[in-house]
Image (tube, rainbow, N blue to C red):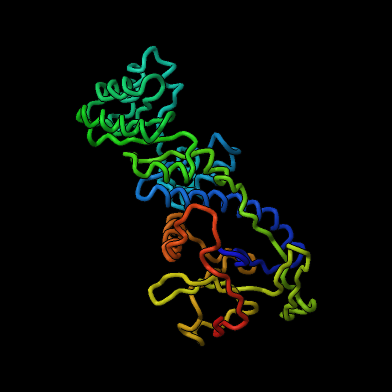
Amino acid sequence: YFSGSPVLVVEAPFAEAVLLETLALSIFNHDGAVASAASRMVLAAASRPCIEMGSRRTHEQAALAAARAAYLAGFASTSNLAAGQAYGIPTSGTSAHAFTLVHDTERDAFVAQVDSLGKQTTLLVDTYDVEAAVRTAVEVAGTGLGAVRIDSGDLGELARQVRRQLDGLGARDTRIVVTGDLDELAIAGLAAAPVDGYGVGTSLVTGSGHPTCGFVYKLVARAASDAAGAPLVGVAKHSPDKATVAGRKWALRRLDDSGAATAEVIGIGPLPDQAEHGADVGGRRLLVDLVRDGDRVWREPLADSRDRHSRSFGELPISAHQLSRGEPVLRTVYETDVRQRR
């Protein structure tokens, strides 16, 4: 979404519409912040998978929503089993330091984990001494060990050391997963390190410095009378720094001939009929009917939402790949007629 673009349009009696305000803003602001952070992290990780591990850093109900939002935005899996059950998200994770500490020795912990979960499990190797733990892990699981996890220290340097050690021990296919207060910038900084995956927690579920998207829910039109089918009259605030644009809106993503997005087009009034204007409708429609006359008329499985996010991100110009602050990568264009071009 881009500046001024409507994410949700509600047409209802005033009292009913107001009842939705807090719920809608709660969902959009929280889930949108997590999804935005997740999208940046997936971008920084390139083809390396990211695991959502933030449940212990947020409210128990928000944890499920965060796992869903992260998966939608490209995360490969979640460590939250409840989210896996509720939404069908792939689940993955590793053992905790407490699991190692509860055993007499690190070797005992590794043996117990491998006996229970098999050699493809991921062993945590930084509880005591990383080099000794990696050696023990391969001795216990063999060269077919699935992965090791590093959770502390200089992750880039440790990953290089562990990669050399694993290769020297013959465990060339054993993957290296890193965790530990990662965000998109830290992930980008590990691009040259021999890391195979990232586990992300706190930064992800708190929006990575942006805990809310700042969505607002504003009245932009009212019926001219109580009569059925009465025309809409646009209304707007003129408050300094909080002015709004009057009128019911529609939104399109304008694309060029190659399918790349060039503008966010926002129109005021009814959307012109696509059959009448054909390809000149101006771009890809961004809004669909969800509920009509109290009945839910549209559903999208989570897997389809995930695919749609990937396609939508793929439409954006290359400047969308920068992680630093900057101007919106698409300009917002207001039009009263879709056939106009500014």
Report whether 75 appears left or right of 160: right
Q: Is residue 295 visible?
A: no
Rendering quarter of residue 19: bottom right
Please tell me which residue is depicted at 43% across the width and 29% down the height of the picture. Answer: 153
Q: Nearer the viewer, residue 135 or 247?
A: 135
The quadrant of the image that shows the C terminus is bottom right
**x, y percent for residue 38:** 48, 49
Rendering quarter of residue 163: top left
Vertical side of 163 occupied by 69: above or below: below
Rendering quarter of residue 64: top right
Please tell me which residue is depicted at 36% across the width and 46% down the height of the picture. Answer: 48
**x, y percent for residue 145:** 27, 30
Q: Nearer the viewer, residue 266 or 189?
A: 189
Report whether 246 appears left or right of 341: right
Q: How many marks on residues?
A: 0
The quadrant of the image that shows the N terminus is bottom right
Vertical side of 52 occupied by 73: above or below: below
Please tell me which residue is depicted at 59% across the width and 73% down the height of the picture. Answer: 266
Q: Residue furthest bottom?
A: 276
Vertical side of 214 occupied by 281: above or below: below
**x, y percent for residue 337:** 59, 83
Q: Is residue 299 visible?
A: yes
**x, y percent for residue 183:** 49, 42
